[in-house]
Image (spheres, coloured by chain):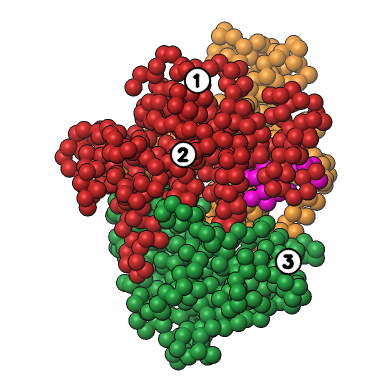
Chain colours: A green, B orange, C red
Amino acid sequence: MSEISGAPVTETTATGPRRDSSAGSPPLLEVSGITKSFGHGRRRLTALDGVDVRLERGETLGLVGESGCGKSTLARVVLGLERPDAGTVRFDGTDPFTLKGKELLAWRRRVQMVFQDPFASLNARMSAADLIGEPWRTHRDIAPTAKDRERRVRELLSLVGLRDSDAHRYPNEFSGGQRQRIGIARALALDPDLIVCDEPVSALDLSVQAQVLNVLSELRERLGVSYVFISHDLSVVRHVSDRVTVMYLGKVIEHGLTEDVFDRPLHPYTAALMSAAPTLDVSGETRDEEIQLRGEIPSPFDIPSGCRFRTRCWKSEAQCAEHAPLAITRGGAADPGREPHEALCHFPLGTGPRGA
Amino acid sequence: MTDPADRSSGDTTPEATSVATPEAASPRTRPPRWWLLLGRDRGAAVAAVILGLVFLIALVGRLFIGDRAIRQDLKASLRPPSFDHGFYGLLGTDVLGRSVLARLIEAAGTTLYVAVPAVLCSLLIGSALGMWAGYHGGWRENIAMRTADVILSFPSLLIAVVVLYVFSPSALNIVLILAVARIPVYLRTARAESAELRSRLFVDAARTFGTPSRNIIYRHILPIALPTLLTVATLDFCFVMLTESSLSFLGIGIQPPDVSWGLMVAQGRQYLQTAWWIAVLPGIAIVLTTVSATVLAAWVRLATDPAQRWRLTLPKKRRGARAAVSPEVIA
Amino acid sequence: MKPSTLPAPAAAEGAALEVEGLRVELRTPSGTVRAVDDVSFSVRKGRTLALLGESGCGKSMTALSIAGLLDPVAEVTEGSVRVSGTDVLRLSPAGRRKLAGPGLSIVFQDALTALNPVQPVGRQLAEPFRIHRGLSRREAKEKAIELMTRVGIPEPRLRARSYPHQFSGGMRQRLLIAMAVALDPDVLIADEPTTALDVTVQAQIMRLLRDLQTERDMAIVLITHDLAVVAQRADDVVVMYAGNVVETGPVHEVFAHPRHPYTKGLLDSVPEHAVRGRPLPAVPGSPPELSAVPSGCVFQARCPLAQERCAQERPHLVSVGASRSAACHFSEELDRV
């Protein structure tokens, strides 16, 4: 599927006004120049290195990358669980790291998270009702009385497709998919604007995964929440996202509309990622264009000079080791008819003759 | 209902763990009542009964024995346990002819008055500090841990001796000394647990709701760390009783005519060859109490964990059936 | 299905592994449950068979019972497993050990726990040669280094002295594979070999397995829950659900025209096939608890085609075409839908 060239740029699946990003109001989430590293001295691990991410209201942003690319750290920064070394996070125009007390608490309500492991993210000693209602113990005004809480728990349970009788059961009595539904209900308890989903379905079985994905997209329609959707499963990301950001070793290397990134990748890494992901195509022939990368992701303690992907890239030349590539843009300002599609590469794909 | 065998075998067969967690599970309303669970576990039930008795005797025993614990009767000196001398002669007499049974009852009160507050104090202070330090890390952790190191680096008996020589050896002082000396034990345990739990996802989740740290500690860390801390506390109970007895032996602990189990052991030691019952019986009392406390703590650990609670509903044999894979794993 | 009393004379149709009527029971406090129920399949040399299913469907249990690594609470109660004609379930422990390696070996999912953390990997790789071939320490070490080169570990001579935690996930998986193929097994069982790995590394590992397979003419049993991996890498597939085989056949046929509603449901719920913005056609509910597997068809509770008959009568695996079979009363109808 690496080259389905000539795919029409139709916007049939476009979801209404979400697409005009150039509209006046600020984006819901704007992350710029975030840098975050852990450790000291020689054992310094750079998890994020000048990351920019934008998310429009009501949209879903897919965040793709292999382990160690920094996508989970980015999620934790957006959630305010980690403080970045440099750069700013703007949520609806305000920087959450400057907030304190009541304001911080008010911001907390607007951004919530669904975790990857539905077992580890639920305290096994609390019943489903306690788990879902936990946020209200801090935000008391949402459901001040026991009766309110009970009613809201029932609402949330039915919203994520669980039964009323499930309220008094404990996590170990639920299957993985049901536990994840509890996690989603808990994230919804504060009625947030943005939910960061960190690999929400990768611990689930396929038939259950589809159910959870459906719950998530239904909630988007009904409640208008936006998602940052982190996953390593490209087919899942492709299904849920409006835009996709691809990360590699702490940097955003490609960003654009889902169709653009998936069908016309600019960065060699994106192309390799798409090509490596096995597909259900059983036509018999293996794909002739399968790109095989050499080696594995370099250690984040020791990042290559210049372009970080050069050690595995089949197009790399001397230039790649010397200079870090600048962003190249298709569409956007240069080509007003198309949405911007950016990549960080000296030799983007689809421009010159493609390397073997 | 979770399927226990799958859990126990789950370690080796990854898929078996979720075999047990299906939709069709009957909606169980409430976890079984704790006393029903306790009834199922004979060991824990016996332990609970023994502990209950000890506490009951400690509380009300004195009302019945009158002055028999201190009344001397040199004619009755060193009588072995027998049925010939009435109820109070059942367990024999000591060298001054005092009834050992009466003294045991009297000492139960003193022992528990010293050991329970001492253990509770160090448990409360040590755990609170430890969880706080472990959760926050950084300088708070450093201060707490260095303080613990300082306390630990002095032999606790030595401090006790010094302090009790300077101040008068009263029960309150003994309690305070023992409490301070044992704080590091809980502090370290609590810190380790809390530092580990801090990185758990459900703690992260709680942070995303804006939950204040003290509430996170109380809600997510304490319930999980508590069973471990309780187990440590029950073991420490034994240690505290023995320390108290050595202090008493040195003459700076419990002062006669008061009596504690430790003191009885200490006093009876010189008669061990001629009159074993003077030292051995209070020794048995100490052992029985601590073992019961330990057994009960182990039971509490299981009973408070929803994922483990089912184990208590099994016949005893199965519980340890956590079998490993045969050693010849890979070719 | 009774296991035949005589071991089949050496690999009748060239099958390297033949599993027949395998039944595994688990002892639980609420009674004995059947984790694997009447599972049969066979693999020829040079072919890859995928055991496909969700967690708890019994696929790993099947693999472990083939390898003789079942947990003591589980027990094979019926059936036979023949590796190149020898019924391994009837072998003595010593005979089994002799077979483990040259006959059959297994690659686990979690390479970090499957390798001994306190031994250099070179030593661990040399072990099979010393045990089975009686090679000297030096010869075995040379063999180990040769193997490491073969599975693509850079600077093998140097790396042989490293410990497992000093390797990346992909490299560890390569080591496990090296260990598994050390003695040229006839059958290689790969239990979710790439689940813990990144996509680009996963592709490398799968390619390595395929190359080794061609080179050494092994039969591979690939245990996985990933449909795409099956589609790309396997020749035949056995779809399992709640301990039962619901469908088998060549991958390209099964995936193109599934004849069991569960297989169809799985295939449909892959986002790749779905239209963006529309709900995915999910299979409702979740698999039954093993202690509560219904007496009729195991899939009835979640099946869109379920009728009264499905509740009463468990469908048998019947042939639905050349080398294909499915266990559904309505597999004909499914094809027409």
Q: Nearer the viewer, residue B330 or B128?
A: B330
Tag 2 near tag 1, CB within 8 Å: no
Disc 3 to disc 2, C-alpha distance: 40 Å
Tag 3 near tag 1, CB within 8 Å: no
Q: Nearer the viewer, residue C7 or B192?
A: C7
Q: Which residue is mark 2?
A: C49
Question: Which residue is painted at 58% across and 41% down in the image?
Answer: C214
10 Å crowding of disc 2: few (<14), some (14-19), many (20+): many
Question: Which residue is painted at 47% across and 29% down in the image?
Answer: C15
Q: Using the image, tell me which numbered label, if any, was put on residue A213.
A: none
Foreground tag (3 vs 2): 2
Q: Position of residue C199 (x, y in %)?
A: 56, 57
Q: Which residue is mark 1?
A: C10
Side of B224 relative to C76 (left or right): right
Foreground tag (3 vs 1): 1
Query: Which residue type carries mark 1?
Result: Ala
Q: Position of residue A291 (x, y in %)?
A: 58, 61
Q: Which residue is mark 3?
A: A303
Q: Magenta segment: does it hold C171?
A: yes
Query: Which residue type carries mark 3?
Result: Ile
